């Protein structure tokens, strides 16, 4: 039975409950899961909270969201979850700063590989991401957050390393749980973070792996300083 969710560490709580439902066989592999509205009602949380958890499960390749059709459970969802849980054991008692240090190590390498492996098919997507990043300062917090997530997700995906993607997915919930710390940053700090993102994207577009790696390190180190 689906249990109502506490407001504490909301994204992680929803994620944990959804993973439990999947492992307990509540949803058929390859089948459609309940809609965001249905899950929000069952968990007694907002639709936005459900959307964040579903997004993480999409990144883990446990779910696949198809516009206009719904969200579907991967055929190999159970094996994916179990393999990620093995990785997760090492992160279970880690501090926020330790998680950010590991994130910096992994995401800087993802930026390096993205620049090294960028294809002609990636160029249009990166240019659109660069355009959105440049417009982000004039957007509201919700849109800034959406662009921020899209930036990191795109760089990780363009590394074209599925294991790296899975490892980062295993700590994504912990990262997202602390992302609210950025909602009340002064405009100058937001500007600096956005400028960092643009440097990473530009380095990838220019196929400069080391420059992309260093720009990502600078971006994440700045983020670490801001949440201390």
Image (tube, rainbow, N blue to C red):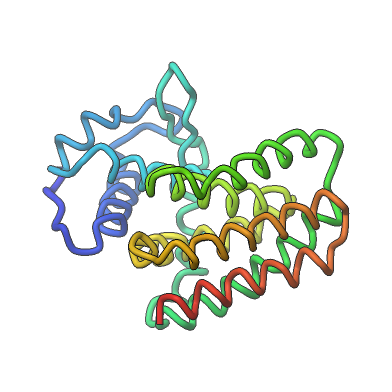
The answer to whether residue 113 shows anywhere in this view is yes
Could you tell me which residue is drawn at 66 percent across and 59 percent down? 163
Which quadrant, please, contains the C terminus?
bottom left
Question: Eyeballing the image, is 120 above or below 82?
Answer: above
Q: How many numbered tags mark residues here?
A: 0
Could you tell me which residue is drawn at 65 percent across and 74 percent down? 218
Question: Eyeballing the image, is 206 above or below 31?
Answer: below
Question: Eyeballing the image, is 26 above or below 104?
Answer: above
Which quadrant, please, contains the N terminus?
top left
The answer to whether residue 90 shows anywhere in this view is no
The spot of residue 80 in percent (x, y) is 51, 51
Q: Is residue 165 left or right of residue 224?
A: right
The spot of residue 44 in percent (x, y) is 12, 43
Q: Is residue 161 left or right of residue 150?
A: right
Could you tell me which residue is drawn at 32 percent across and 34 percent down? 27
Could you tell me which residue is drawn at 72 percent across and 59 percent down? 199
Residue furthest top as drawn: 68
The spot of residue 68 in percent (x, y) is 44, 16
The spot of residue 6 in percent (x, y) is 14, 57
Residue 91 appears in which quarter of the rendering? bottom left
Question: Eyeballing the image, is 187 above or below 217?
Answer: above
Residue 200 appears in which quarter of the rendering? bottom right
């Amino acid at each position: 039975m689906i249990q109502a969710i506490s407001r504490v560490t909301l994204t992680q709580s929803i994620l944990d409950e959804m993973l439990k439902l999947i492992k307990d066989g509540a949803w058929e592999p390859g089948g459609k899961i309940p809609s965001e509205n249905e899950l929000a009602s069952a968990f007694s949380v907002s639709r936005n909270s459900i959307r964040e958890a579903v997004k993480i499960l999409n990144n883990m390749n446990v779910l696949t969201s198809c516009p206009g059709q719904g969200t579907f459970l991967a055929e190999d969802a159970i094996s994916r979850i179990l393999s990620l849980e093995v990785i997760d054991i090492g992160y279970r008692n880690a501090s926020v700063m330790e998680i950010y240090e590991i994130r910096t190590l992994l995401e800087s390498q993802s930026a390096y590989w993205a620049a090294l492996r960028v294809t002609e098919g990636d160029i249009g997507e990166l240019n659109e991401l660069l355009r959105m990043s440049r417009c982000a300062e004039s957007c509201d917090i919700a849109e800034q957050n959406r662009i921020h997530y899209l930036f990191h997700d795109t760089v990780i995906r363009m590394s074209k390393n599925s294991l790296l993607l899975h490892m980062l997915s295993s700590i994504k919930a912990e990262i997202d749980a602390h992302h609210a710390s950025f909602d009340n940053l002064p405009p100058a700090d937001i500007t600096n973070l956005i400028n960092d993102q643009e440097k990473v994207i530009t380095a990838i577009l220019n196929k400069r792996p080391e420059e992309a790696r260093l720009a990502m390190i600078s971006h994440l180190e700045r983020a670490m300083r801001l949440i201390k």
